Amino acid sequence: MDRCLEDEDIEVFNAIGSEKVRQNAHIELIASENFVSRAVMEAVGSVLTNKYAEGYPGRRYYGGCENVDVVEQLAIDRARRLFGAEHVNVQPHSGSQANFAVYASVLKPGDKILTLSLQNGGHLTHGHPKNISGMLYKAIHYDVNGETGYIDYDLMEQIAKTERPKLLTIGASAYPRAIDFELVAKIAHENGAMVFADIAHIAGLVATGLHQSPVPYCEFVTTTTHKTLRGPRGGMIMCKKEYASTIDSSLFPGTQGGPLMHVIAGKAVCFLEAQKPEFKEYQKQILKNSAALAKKMAANGYHVVSGGTDNHLMLIDLRYTHGDMTGNDAQNLLESANITANKNTVPRETRSPSKASGVRFGTPAVTTRGMGESEMLQIADLIDSVLRNANDREVMNFAKKTAEEICNRFPLPY
Ligand code: DSN
């Protein structure tokens, strides 16, 4: 029982070792991924994984919770301070769990929700027909403007007026522009809807004041903690205090059992780190890197959706430059040159989500490694040479070697 991982399970040990090598040797451009600090990693790999703690600090269904109570309360207090939230629940295992707990707290099956669809940059949990949010509730969608790529707030208002949804959801996983949460809340409230902002992607930008915060305007705000926020993989809910007990009981016992206390410890550490001045500098660099990458991609002839980016990510619509290449083809080609990204649907998509016509690039992870604008220019040129020379083995080998060289200059700390 007390053997180390290598002795106990060589297969898992080796897979973890290979993953370490992969993470070190690849340029990570998946917009929703990041590398946690050593302190977060330590907290998540701690003895707290052994503890059951159903309930909330001071109100548990198990004995021996005095230490995990400290940890969870720290996480709650730090998150409240960081985002200026009236109430925080740090127990959601993921963003999807957080989102479902919000829906279940105030909606009945059949209630109407107005959201941005997954295809146009939203998220699976924002009413996709194959997700529980789309099965239980009647999801209707506003959209991004097909020409500009910006959210069409006029359309949102028009639909809110005619359809009178109970909840309006704002937030995205593939939207490169700043969101006007104040305007969205106004549209929702004037039309009898509550408003729910999902800031999973931009939480780090919001926490540091670089993007507008939805917290003052929205009844509910959810986030994951592992994207721009750079914490452990998990979720969180913020809400106005009148919804505090409804949200808490919707999460536990409503939709989850025991919390993952080791992950909550990692969240607490992440919220502490996010209050430091260097975290704001880090977020600023994410934005600079994103702008530099998008600008160079455009200069290299690519169609950057909406003409650029205000945040950590961008979408490239390949149909303008590589008519026959799907997003999936591009993802695979880049992967073979040690550049990790993901295929993505784009506005006015013409292909299925499994093929897609675009790729999404994000800069949180490369910025964590210490890369700056000059590396972004180099990476944009690498991407270009890979996508233009798919069948040229020599170019592909050179691109892979260059990607490895860039990575070697910015090693991960673990
Ligand atoms: N699937 C995540 C993303 O990559 O954006 C969101 O949950």
Image (spheres, helix red, strand yellow):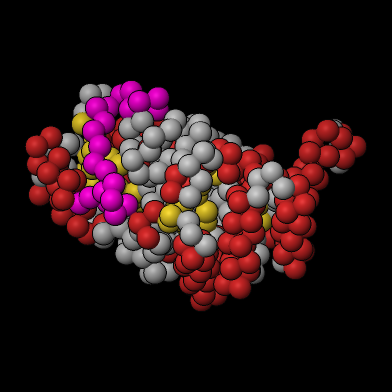
Residue at the spot 58% in from the left edge and 61% down from the top edge: 380
Residue at the spot 43% in from the left edge and 40% down from the top edge: 345
The residue nearer to you, when weighing 239 against 72, is 239
Percent of width and height locating residue 188: 17, 47
Asked if the stretch drawn in magenta spans residue 140, the answer is yes
Q: Where 170 sits versus 134, above or below? A: below
Q: Where 75 sits versus 132, above or below? A: below
Percent of width and height locating residue 165: 17, 36
Q: Is residue 267 left or right of residue 191?
A: right
Percent of width and height locating residue 5: 83, 39
Asked if residue 228 can be seen in this view, the reply is no
The residue nearer to you, when weighing 378 against 280, is 378
Residues in magenta, as a range = 129-153
Asked if residue 301 can be seen in this view, the reply is yes
Residue at the spot 30% in from the left edge and 58% down from the top edge: 179
Residue at the spot 33% in from the left edge and 27% down from the top edge: 134
Q: Is residue 57 left or right of residue 411?
A: left
Image quadrant in which the N terminus is located: top right
